[in-house]
Image (cartoon, rainbow, N blue to C red):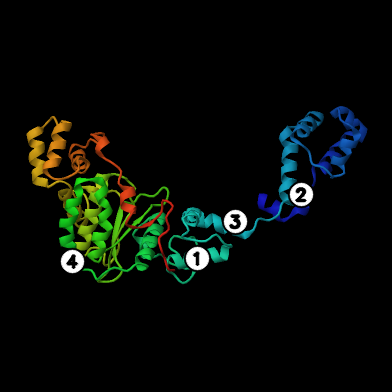
């Protein structure tokens, strides 16, 4: 009924029309109703001549005068106002559909897209998602077919982050990838575990091995730790979101993604890691896929060698005092936060010695190709 009112205004009468009908039915003159309402004839006349609407106060007064619910007159006025309102621009519905699927407003704020009219915005989205027409954008209501990303059930905001990282990766150049160089890089990376500021060397080391390393701030209401994929058979990419800005999480996620690269995971489809802080970081068989399990195992062993950590925890069980953990970390040449991250996992105690889990993001983004936190990575679309 509301849609009919909005498009067929001639069927909706001004409240003054109905007031005149009620007056005629009761045999009241204008001055009679004015007397009953306690208002001037001039004020009432403007309503009866349909030159003025009725206010909520007048709706209540008329309800008393005619002994009907106030909603009767209030609804008449609302229906009349809606019937005379302009039909919204079709772009309102189009922007609604966009924003309901992808965080388009945030993508504009992040300068992934430019604010423009709806047609150009749809074209930008199509280009962003590397399809020919807006009708091919994954997850959009008018999409002509389901993409493999939809089949894999990758949430739209994660998908947008993925494509952004891919765009950035294509816009930067690195030496040719060498698996041997990356394995050697792990030796150098291990020397950086001693202090949080040492993470600033990570981008340089990975670049020298031919790995495109990109740090991109995640989109709101999105969970993603990192990702590994290949632009081609010789071009691996590691993307990280730093959604948990802590020294232990950074090294675990980074080493996890490096293992994917070394095992050439992600060549057929992107390896997207969203919960390495929780169940997704398990090293137990059948808890995660085998590809993820071996990457988790490599990451955990990198942060704290499994045999030495196991020995330490057996010796100290059930009391893991701060001084002992810090001393143990020194023997491993690691910052306490890196080791404590693994102890927390083992104990399933995520309140344990949190003060050692220092932030590292400022050091990482100082030398990394970064998108987010006020920075815009170079991209050629």
**Residue 15 point in image, percent of width and height:** 80, 42
Q: Which residue is mark 3?
A: 92
Mark 2 or mark 1, which is nearer the start of the sequence? 2
Q: Which residue is mark 2?
A: 12
**Residue 302 point in image, percent of width and height:** 16, 50
Crowding at label 4, few (<14), some or many (≥20) Cα neighbours within 10 Å?
some
Of 351 and 129, nearer the camera is 351
Visible in this render: residue 278? no
Could you say whether the residue bearing mark 2 is in a helix, strand or loop? loop
Could you say whether the residue bearing mark 1 is in a helix, strand or loop? helix
The tag on residue 314 is none
Residue located 44% across and 60% down the image: 139
Relative to 28, is 372 above or below?
Answer: below
Q: Is residue 243 left or right of residue 349?
A: right
Q: Which residue is mark 4?
A: 179
Relative to 242, is 40 above or below?
Answer: above
**Residue 98 point in image, percent of width and height:** 51, 57
Mark 3 or mark 2, which is nearer the start of the sequence? 2
Crowding at label 2, few (<14), some or many (≥20) Cα neighbours within 10 Å?
some
Give the alpha-carbon distance from disc 1 to disc 2, as whole Å.
42 Å
Q: Which residue is mark 1?
A: 124
Foreground mark, 2 or 3?
Answer: 3
Mark 4 or mark 1, which is nearer the start of the sequence? 1
Give the alpha-carbon distance from disc 2 to disc 3, as whole Å.
25 Å
Residue located 82% across and 29% down the image: 65
Foreground mark, 1 or 2?
Answer: 1
């Amino acid at each position: 009924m509301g849609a009919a009112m909005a498009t067929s205004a001639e069927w909706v009468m001004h409240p003054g029309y109905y007031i005149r009908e009620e007056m005629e039915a009761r045999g009241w003159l204008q001055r009679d109703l004015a007397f009953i309402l306690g208002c001037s004839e001039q004020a009432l006349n403007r309503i009866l001549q349909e030159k003025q609407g009725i206010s909520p106060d007048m709706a209540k007064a008329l309800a008393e005068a005619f002994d009907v619910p106030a909603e009767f007159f209030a609804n008449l006025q609302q229906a009349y106002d809606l019937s005379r309102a302009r039909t919204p621009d079709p772009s309102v519905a189009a922007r609604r559909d966009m924003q309901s699927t992808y965080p388009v407003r945030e993508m504009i704020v992040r300068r992934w897209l430019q604010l423009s009219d709806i047609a150009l915005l749809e074209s930008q989205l199509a280009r962003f998602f590397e399809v020919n027409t807006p009708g091919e954008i994954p997850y959009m209501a008018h999409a002509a077919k389901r993409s493999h990303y939809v089949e894999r059930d990758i949430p739209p905001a994660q998908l947008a982050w993925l494509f952004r990282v891919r765009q950035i990766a294509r816009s930067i150049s690195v030496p040719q990838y060498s698996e041997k160089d990356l394995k050697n890089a792990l030796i150098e990376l291990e020397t950086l575990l001693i202090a949080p500021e040492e993470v600033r060397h990570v981008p340089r080391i990975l670049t020298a091995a031919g790995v495109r390393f990109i740090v991109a701030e995640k989109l709101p209401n999105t969970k993603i730790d990192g990702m590994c994929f290949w632009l081609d058979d010789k071009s691996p990419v590691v993307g990280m979101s730093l959604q948990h800005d802590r020294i232990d999480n950074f090294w675990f996620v980074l080493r996890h993604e490096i293992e994917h690269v070394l095992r050439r995971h992600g060549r057929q489809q992107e390896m997207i890691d969203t919960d390495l802080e929780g169940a997704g970081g398990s090293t137990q068989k059948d808890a995660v896929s085998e590809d993820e399990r071996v990457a988790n195992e490599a990451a955990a062993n990198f942060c704290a060698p499994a045999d030495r950590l196991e020995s330490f925890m057996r010796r100290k069980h059930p009391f893991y005092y701060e001084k002992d953990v810090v001393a143990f970390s020194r023997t491993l040449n690691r910052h306490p936060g890196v080791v404590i991250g693994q102890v927390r996992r083992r104990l399933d105690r995520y309140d344990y010695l949190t003060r050692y889990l220092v932030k590292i993001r400022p050091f990482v983004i100082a030398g990394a190709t970064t998108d987010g936190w006020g920075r815009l990575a170079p991209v050629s679309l």
